Image: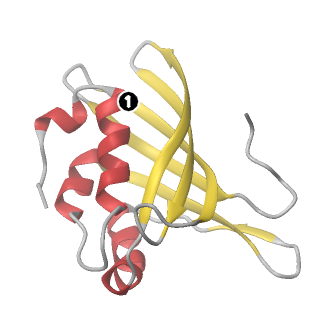
Amino acid sequence: MTGPQRADAETIDALITALYETITGPAGPRDWDRERHIFAPGAHLMPTRFAEDGSHSIQILDNEGYIKSRTPFFEKTSFYEKEVSRREEHFGHIAHVWSAYEGRYSPDGEVVLRGVNSFQLYHDGDRWWVMSMMWENEPTGIPLPK
């Protein structure tokens, strides 16, 4: 664990890289202090879900709610997620990032999930912050965009 680092918030690339690094690794604790440094106070993390009956829902969490909900999984499960492509759009002090990802249970293992993260970012004149993050895992029949 590395903890909060100034360099994590200086560029969009560093911010997104740090975010993936905080959830990636062998089973055990994650570097939640580093994650707290990446997300702005009041930021939202919003996973979307498909149900077996075909319905769809969204969960809206603050950072502490996300940490609480995901800690049990990461404590017992090795998980490695990496970005496979990115598209960025900027205007003034805001940016939107589309980041496609793949997840595995070991660094070189079989891909067990893919999806897209949507990040809304803000630069306060000093550093970048993640203001919100929404994501959807790739369901059967809806392939990731190229």
Q: Position of residue 30 (x, y in %)?
A: 25, 69
Q: Residue at x 31, y 37 (%)?
A: 15
Furthest toward the front, the residue is 108
Picture layout, residue 144 above or below residue 32: above
Picture layout, residue 146 above or below residue 114: above
Colouring convention used in this rendered image of the protein: secondary structure
> In the image shown, does 83 or 60 lie closer to the viewer?
83
Picture layout, residue 93 above or below residue 58: above
> In the image shown, does 44 or 137 lie closer to the viewer?
137
Q: Check disc 1 and give the amino acid type.
A: Tyr
> In the image shown, does 127 or 52 lie closer to the viewer?
52
Left/right placement of residue 22 relative to residue 78 reads: left
* Secondary structure state at the residue bearing disc 1: strand
Q: Looking at the figure, which quarter contains the N terminus?
A: bottom left
Q: Residue at x 13, y 49 (%)?
A: 4
Q: Position of residue 81 (x, y in %)?
A: 45, 57
Mark 1, Cα crowd under 10 Å, few <14 / some 14-19 / many 20+, is many
Q: Looking at the figure, which quarter contains the C terminus?
A: top right
Q: Which residue is mark 1?
A: 122
State the count of labels.
1
Picture layout, residue 18 above or below residue 97: below
Q: Position of residue 101 (x, y in %)?
A: 55, 49
Left/right placement of residue 101 relative to residue 140 reads: left
Q: Position of residue 93 (x, y in %)?
A: 39, 18
Q: Residue at x 42, y 33 (%)?
A: 121
Q: Residue at x 77, y 63 (%)?
A: 139
Q: Quadrant of residue 10?
A: top left
Q: Quadrant of residue 34?
A: bottom left
